Amino acid sequence: MDNMLHKVANLVLGENHGKNKTTVKGKVVLMKKNVLDFNEVGASVMDRAHELLGNHISIQLISITHADSGSSGKRLRGKLGKPAILEDWISTITPLTAGESTYEVTFDWDEEIGLPGGCLVQNLHHSEFYLMTLTLENVPGHGQVHFVCNSWVYPAKKYTKDRVFFANQAYLPGETPELLRPYREEEMLVLRGNGTGMLEEWDRVYDYAYYNDLGEPDDADKVRPVIGGSSEYPYPRRGRTGRKPTESDPKTESRLSLIDFLNIYVPRDERFGHLRMSDFLAQGLEAILKFLLPEFEALFDDTVDEFDTFEDFLKLFNGGIKLPQGPALDKIPLQFFKELVRSDGEGLLKYSTPQVIRDNLSAWSTDEEFAREMIAGVNPVSIQLLKVFPPISKLDAKLYGNQNSSIRSHHIQEQLEGLEVNEALKAKRIFILDHHDSMMPYVNRINATASKVYATRTLLFLQNEGTLKPIAIELSLPHPDGEEYGAISKVYTPAKDGVEAAIWLLAKTYVAVNDSGVHQLISHWLNTHAVIEPFIIATNRQLSALHPINKLLRPHFRDTMNINATARNILINSEGILERSFFTGKYSIEMSSKIYKNWVFPNQALPVDLVLRGVAVEDSSSPHGLRLTIEDYPYAVDGLEIWSVIKIWVEDYCKFYYKTKDMVKNDTELQSWWKELREEGHGDLKDEPWWPKMNSIQDVIDNCTIIIWVASALHAAVNYGQYGYAGYPPNRPTLSRRLMPEPNTPEYDELKEDPKSAFLKTVTPQLQSLLSISLIEILSRHTSDELYLGQRECPEWTMDAEPLMAFEKFGKKLKEIEENIVKMNNDERLKNRNGLVKIPYTLLYPSSEEGITGRGIPNSVAI
């Protein structure tokens, strides 16, 4: 009888009657679906309707101390708490512009939950939302429990499994609480996908593909080879989209239309946030390419191919040029139009004045500045110590004949401050900017187009005052009877007056054209953007969000897949902006593939790179164990400081989680990650003997330091100074249209009589210049949501106190570096830090404000 009464009471009053009911309050911070800066009104209405119909957003906590009664003994799972719904969705006032909203959630606390280590989130609304954080207050016996989610959650019908998020406690795989392991492993399976089908925006799949979506085989002018997956065209992998192949070539993936390029698949959490999307003005890039190019032809006088005078360049920065009129202008997206006319005056196409001409209109053309930019400009990573004179080639003599340099002692002897050539070599005072071997195999093909280029070598001498000066430039062409017969080369030396001075300026210009292409294709695109993407994919596929190395690296992957996908659609694709504006044209990515054959991961470590280039030697008595052969080398000086503090931070962090080398070897996720990076992400180089091991704590530290350096500081050094130096096209032209004038020709007579006009007819013409300026202005700009080295989205990114303290120390060290950079830039003895153009070297100054500042190290390759 008592038992029956008890059952009746349970039915009427509930099973928990008579017990002390406990609740735990939580706070959820999220952003609703939005388009650029504004909430999508339709989505908001539909979500409220779903709320009224009882379709809520619910959260279930996952216990790591009590098992679910339905799980088997061999595969125990954490018990799930009762679903709790977000409260007051309808009545909570959300901002008109996209922003954070905070909601309360109340959990009926079950004592058997104990400590929650994860939660399941189910979205029964019409629209997705961006879940930022969940914070539980006063969890019995544990206090506050924090979840950093930072992920888009789509309606539950889009998923085969409910979304799982983990509390902010990092675990190595073997240390993961047993009850949490199934959730950890299942989440990784979701992120890997099954390798088939076209991926949709709500999919969360990270997978690999070749660069097989750059060309269009149905258009003869746009056919491009598949890059990656072959010995002929090796390349890092990019993110798979799963789009169908083209009809005419099953190996080539179909492309999106230019209008739809923003819809290219990247995992939703890798896409730009609303602020970056607005700031980036991706639709503006589309406008430049599709609508503005035809309209620009009406802007100028009859000579549409070139600027007539140097004053025409200055009009871009002083007062502007009247915008074209016509139907195309009506199609330009509003955001981009605002950017276009943001300076002053209605209808003005005005760019901010690049730093290189801000204080002095002619300093850019001096020998001093030409040389200084090789160690303090946008491409400070190519100059090398000359070890053998004359310089020699590594090209295959069977294919290319004799490609060794024709520079001889008599060309340079008088410029070595009294030293013999051998003495200068021994004293480590002769350097070379060598773009010969990388260019020569393509010179004939490029010169068959409208571009006319040389393969170049430039010798420089380190003067007593610590600055460099160019002492010889060699311009080389393939032999006219065939490439196998070697090079036809001419050597040019400095001149101050007459036609010789004009010829010398042109020789430096051909070098600058080479260097512009190498910078954009290799130093910037290949060596930061492209090589990092496989690390992002592998990290998400093999390192759980609970893994400490995932937590370490995640900030350095932000937005990279999105910007790379955008690049494939409008920048590096066939007849994209890069092909249109650089001399490499349709061979651009193919050329970078050839260079990738020589890419070596451990050589990306800054100290290793400096030693290999001969600009530093190992010296235990010097700071960072290196002595620079060019003492005043701003990129190397500041870079070594940044490298050092990154490595200290990574060491402090990694040693907290890994106490022994066996912990590294037995970390199954870490080992799978490193294996997949080699065999899949950089699969074309998988058999190279130089791949580092992952068998010790030091291996983890060294490899992670390189990844962070490349994604943050290296990218900053080669990207954010672009507008300051290349925003003035004569300083860094992207192509040349005529070869060096020969005596007794009309071109030579013109050079002699009007050297400025001859120069302008040689360098980048009007339309390509404007295209290039528009591109690099966007690439050089910091967005309003930028996160810089030493910053994180959320201060509670980990629950471990020691890593938080180490990160705080890291931030303080970066502030000290900033102070030291300012001091060095104010030291007049360090002539290379400002130069005649008076641009202080700040490209490795860690912090910045929004805009084009020429400084700041963002965490990631985000633009």
Image (cartoon, rainbow, N blue to C red):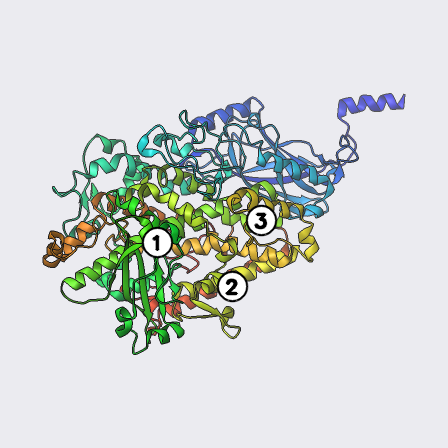
Kindly report the distance in space between the C-alpha atoms of the residues bearing marks 2 and 3.
20 Å
The single residue placed furthest to the right in the displayed view is: 1
Q: Earlier in the sequence, mark 3 or mark 1?
A: 1
Residue type of the residue flagged with mark 3: Lys
Which circle marks residue 401 in the picture? 1
- The foreground one among 1 and 182 is 182
The spot of residue 643 in percent (x, y) is 49, 61
Instruction: Report crowding for label 3: few under 14, some 14 to 19, many 20 or more residues within 10 A (C-alpha).
Output: some
Which circle marks residue 551 in the picture? 3
Residue type of the residue flagged with mark 1: Gly
| Relative side of 770 to 110, left or right | left
The single residue placed furthest to the bottom in the displayed view is: 418
| Relative side of 772 to 597, left or right | left
- Judged from the image, the secondary structure of the residue bearing numbered disc 3 is helix
Q: Which residue is mark 2?
A: 644
Instruction: Report crowding for label 2: few under 14, some 14 to 19, many 20 or more residues within 10 A (C-alpha).
Output: some
The spot of residue 735 in percent (x, y) is 26, 49
Snapshot quadrant of residue 375: bottom left
